[in-house]
Amino acid sequence: MGNLSALLPLLLFMGAMIGIGFYVRREGSRSGTGFVKNYFIGNHNLGGFVLAMTTVATYSSVSSFVGGPGMAWQIGFGWIYMAVVQVTAIFLVLGVYGKRVALLSRRLDAVTVVDIIRARFNSDNLAALAAFIIVLFFCATMTAQFVGGAKLFSAVTGYSYEMGLLLFGLTVVLYTAIGGFRAVALTDTCCAIVMMVGIVLLLYYVLQAGGGYMAIMDNLHANHPEMFEPLSAGHMPLTLYLTQWILVGICTIALPQSVVRGISYKDTKGLHQAMLIGTVVVGFMNIGINFTGILAHGVLTGPLESYGGVDNIIPKTIITAMPPSLVGFAIIGPLAASISTISGLLIVASSAIIKDIYLHAKKSQGEKVSDKKLRLLSMAATGIIGVLVFAIAVTPPSLIWIINMFAFGGLETAFFWVLLLGLFWRKANKAGALLAMAGGTFIYILPMLGKILLLLTSAEWAAAFAEALNWSPFGLHRIVLGLTVSLVCFIIGAYKGKPTKEETLALFFPGK
Amino acid sequence: MNPKEKYRQICREAGATGLVLALIIVLWCVLGFGLSGSEVMVLGLPLWAVAGTVGIWLLAILLTFILVKFVFKDMALSKPFVKSDKE
């Protein structure tokens, strides 16, 4: 039987999130502006604080709250040193793209990042490819978030995995479908706040249970001296640091779920505030939760094997260190990290299908879609994607895990040069962008295709083939190869292909 | 600001943001790996483990503050390019 007191705070929190969804819907129906803009982007109305919180909360996933600190427990301060590169993520994406996409979206009447890409390169094929990449990788990522959250729920409360999934999974699908982007932004803000409270709470009880800060540190110095070295006696190789700078630092500026936030805010003052607040919050979370992971040595003193892997460190710490009556509050934090990422991806995936594919097709046929019909279709699309991912998460097939492994880097490879060069380089053209997105992503996901082939055939030749596809220069992360190929493709396309039309350039690069 | 000036300003801001990133990467190397040989202890931790984590965080906040205070400028978004020279 599960711990009932652990369930109550969670139920209240999820109830409040659904309440926000309904509240936003009522407000929205009164505002009288176009439905699509309202539903998918919150009508350009976010203030600085909410913009900061929703960007951070979407970016911080359940793995930053469970797997990450588990690794910190094992590796030590090198892990925090690596995690801290993420303090650059928020000011970078908002500083580089914040105003650029805000102005362009208003000028082009764009609601999604794909809208902007379509207009910049005059290419429906590129837009379709971008939408496909977004939907594929977002669905895999969302599944992983569902599974991570539900596993944590069942480990800590004692209730079943399926019940956890039902409880928070249906909640997030419901409020996102009902309230759209504005509900996502407001619930994200609540989520970010409870994440921070959760970290402080857990830190406090870990220190208590471990006999105080100095006692824990003395024990670590005596028994795990390697945890105080940046390379952690070989557990943290230099290549991993380099990879992290690229993967979770610099290239996160290309993630469509982050860039779209540049369309959503009200004025530049808010943007400036958000850059500052976001940097404070993302650093606090990353350092706080990973530091707590290290201090958990005061609570969990056995070897890693006795806890069954790094993913179990945080759940076990919560159960051991927290009084049973507070366990419910402690898991709201990680579950909030999970639902805030799911909601952010869900609304963008839904916009890709409704706005980028369906509405565009209708528009090019010259058909008009009524607001009422759009409202129904948009909510249905969000709900259907959400429920579909939810159903997959009940018994996730191996295929999903393979796709998920490549999702983060795949999105970055697909969008990095297309956005950066597309928005800041006049010579960037359709041929270059198409080649860069298709070529770079294809090279990046080759090992994924190999693994899928192996999964389907489980033949010996497939194993050898998959192994060969896995090759990467100097043992660097595959994304280095993907980005390089993508850049080369882009430049070849830019110089060999047709230049962009003057009308388009005038829209994007005013006053030559 | 007219559209042209806005675009110029945005490019300047994006460039400055990139410079801050480069600066943080350098500082991160210096304060972390660079200090890893130091024997100095802060709160029971080696100096690099504090400077390379909390130190980098505080510096990132400071540099972002400098960016938004001195480089970034407010501009109207509501009617951004209503009349550009082409229209």
Image (cartoon, coloured by chain):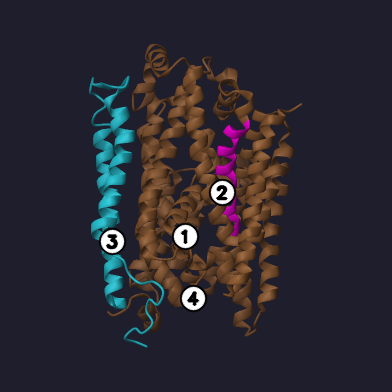
What whole-number distance in Å separates the C-alpha atoms at marks 1 and 3? Answer: 18 Å
Let me know if residue A353 is in the magenta part: no
What whole-number distance in Å separates the C-alpha atoms at marks 2 and 1? Answer: 14 Å
Dividing the picture into quadrants, the one containing residue A329 is top right
Instruction: State the image coordinates of residue A484 (x, y, percent, origin top left).
Output: 38, 54
What whole-number distance in Å separates the C-alpha atoms at marks 4 and 3? Answer: 25 Å
Colour in which chain A is drawn: brown
Q: Is residue A338 above or below residue A376?
A: above
Residue at mark 3: B72
Q: Residue at x 62, y 42 (%)?
A: A461
What whole-number distance in Å separates the C-alpha atoms at marks 4 and 2? Answer: 27 Å
Instruction: State the image coordinates of residue A37 (x, y, percent, origin top left).
Output: 55, 70
Amino acid type at mark 4: Asp
Examine the rendering and report whether any part of residue A211 can be seen.
Answer: yes
Front residue of this view, candidates A433 and A328? A328
Q: How many residues crowd mark 2 within 10 Å: few (<14), some (14–19), many (20+)?
A: many
Secondary structure state at the residue bearing disc 3 = loop
Q: Residue at x 51, y 15 (%)?
A: A301
Residue at mark 1: A261
Residue at mark 4: A109
Same chain for mark 4 and mark 3? The answer is no
